[in-house]
Image (cartoon, helix red, strand yellow):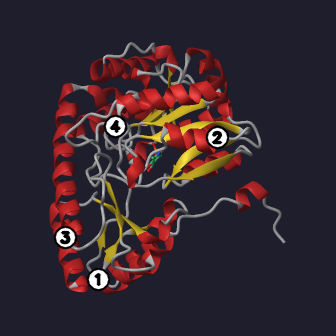
Amino acid sequence: MNHWSDRVADIDSFKVMDLLKRAKELESQGHDVVNMCVGEPDFSTPEPISEAGARAIQAGHTQYTPAAGIPQLREAIAGFYQQRYGLDISPERVIVTAGASGALLMVFATLANPGQTFMMADPGYPCNPRFLRLVEARGQLVPTTADDNYQLTPELIEQNWQENTAGILLASPANPTGSVVSREQFELISQTVRGLGGHRVVDELYHGLTYGLDAPSVLEVDQDAFVLNSFSKYFGMTGWRLGWTVVPETAVGEIERLAQNLFISPPTISQHAALAAFEPDTITILEQRREAFRERRDLLVAGLRELNFEIPVTPEGAFYVYADASRLTDNAFDFCWDLLEQDKIAVTPGVDFGEYRANQFVRFSYTTGVEQIEKALDRLRKRLS
Ligand SMILES: Cc1ncc(COP(=O)(O)O)c(C=O)c1O
C-alpha cells in the first residue's frame, strides 16, 4: 500500500488529459485533428525575446539570481505599469516568479491559514483550489452565470461570505469565459471585500489579450490587492516559466522569504530574455498577434452562435470561448468525446472548470489559425445539420 499524503490524493488531474491522449493517438494514426484544447498561444516566443535569451546563455547568465528577480526586470515590469496603466508601482513590490503558478502558490500560502477559504467564480481556472488544498485551505466556488458576466459580484460576495473566508480571487480576463472586470466593478468589489476584512487577489494573466478594450488593473483602484501576472500568454513565453506578482509593500518580505525557500530564484535565462519583452519591436509583434486573436474570436463566436451554441456574453479577452451546448446535447462531456472520435475536433469539457452547470459547457480555444477554426466549424456544421 502506498502512503501518499491526503492533500496529494485530493488533487485531481484534468479530465481533458484523457481526451488529449486520444487526440494524439488519432493524429499518430494519420487523422487530421483540429486541436482547440490548449491554453497556450500557437505563436512561438517573439524573436527579440528568444535572441535575448540566447545572448544570456552566451554571456554566462546561468546562475541563481536574487529570489525576487533581477533588479532590471523588476524595474522594467514596474515601468510597464506606468506605461500601460499610468500607475506608479515601486519595483520593490514586484516579485518575479516561476510563472503565475509559482506566484499563486506563494500568495495563497501567505494569505490563507489552514481551514480558511478563498472565494472564486465557478467556472474558473481549476488549479486555484488545488494550490489552496496544498496549503490546507480550500477554494470556495460560487456559481456564476452570464448575468453576472461569469464573475463574482459584490452581492454574491456578501451572500456567500463565511467566517472562515480569507478573501476572494478574481481573474480578468478569465479562463474559461474570457470575461473582463470593469474598473467600476473592481471598485465596488474591493470596497465590499475590504469591508468584510478579506484579501483581494486578482489574476491578470491575460492582460494584453483583450479585444476592443484594455482590461483595467485592480491596482488602479486598490493598492492593497495582490496581482498575479505572467509572461506566458500575451508575451508568448509559456515554456520559459516566468511570471510576477505585485504585492502590497507590507507583504514583500513575506513573499520574498517564501520565494527563497521554495524556488531559490526564478529562471535566470528567462529573466534576461524577458528584459526584451517590453521593447517597442516586441510590443509591435505582440499587438499584431492580438489582432490575429481578435479575428479568430470573431470568426469562432459567430460560427458557434450560428450552430446554436449559446454564448450570451461575447468573450472580451483571453483566447477561449465558453459555449453553452445544452441546445445540442444533455451531456457536454460525452459530446466532447463524440466530437473527437467522429469529427476529429479536440475541445475541453466544462467539467474541467467547475461544477455549476459544467456538463452543459464546452471550452473552445482559439489558439489555432483561422483555417483550422474554419475547418472545425465546417465539421461541426456537418455533424449538427
Ligand atoms: C487563469 C490562469 N492563471 C494562471 C495560469 C498559470 O500560468 P503560468 O504559470 O504559465 O504563468 C493559467 C494557465 O493557463 C491560467 O489560465
Q: Where is residue 115 in the image (x, y as percent from the top left)?
A: 76, 43
Left or right for 192, reference 346: right
The correct choice, above or below, for 5 with respect to 170 in the image is below
Can residue 104 be seen in this snapshot?
no
Q: Where is residue 121 in the image (x, y as percent from the top left)?
A: 51, 49
Question: Does mark 4's beta carbon lie closer than 8 Å to ligand 1?
Answer: no
Q: Quadrant of residue 312?
A: bottom left
Marks 3 and 1, Cα distance to the nearest angstrom? 18 Å
Question: Of helix, strand and loop, which one carries label 2?
Answer: loop
Q: Which amino acid does label 2 sit on?
A: Trp
Pair 3/1: label in front: 3
Q: Which amino acid does label 4 sit on?
A: His
Question: Of helix, strand and loop, which one carries label 4?
Answer: loop
Q: Position of residue 64 (x, y in %)?
A: 55, 28
Query: Which of the pair 55/47 is nearer the observer?
Result: 47
Mark 4 / mark 1, whichever is N-terminal: 4
- At horizontal 59% and vertical 19% (from top left) the residue drawn is 252
Instruction: Mark 2: give few (<14), some (14-19) or many (20+) Cα within 10 Å.
Output: many
Left or right for 315, reference 15: left
- At horizontal 36% and vertical 53% (from top left) the residue drawn is 40
Kindly identify which residue carries mark 4: 207
Kindly identify which residue carries mark 3: 306
Instruction: Mark 4: give few (<14), some (14-19) or many (20+) Cα within 10 Å.
Output: many
Pair 1/2: label in front: 2
Specify the quadrant that holds the C terminus: bottom left
Question: Of helix, strand and loop, which one carries label 3?
Answer: helix
Marks 4 and 1, Cα distance to the nearest angstrom? 33 Å
Instruction: Mark 3: give few (<14), some (14-19) or many (20+) Cα within 10 Å.
Output: few
Please report contact status of discs 3 and 1: CB closer than 8 Å, yes or no: no
Kindly identify which residue carries mark 2: 161
Left or right for 148, reference 133: left
- At horizontal 53% and vertical 60% (from top left) the residue drawn is 354
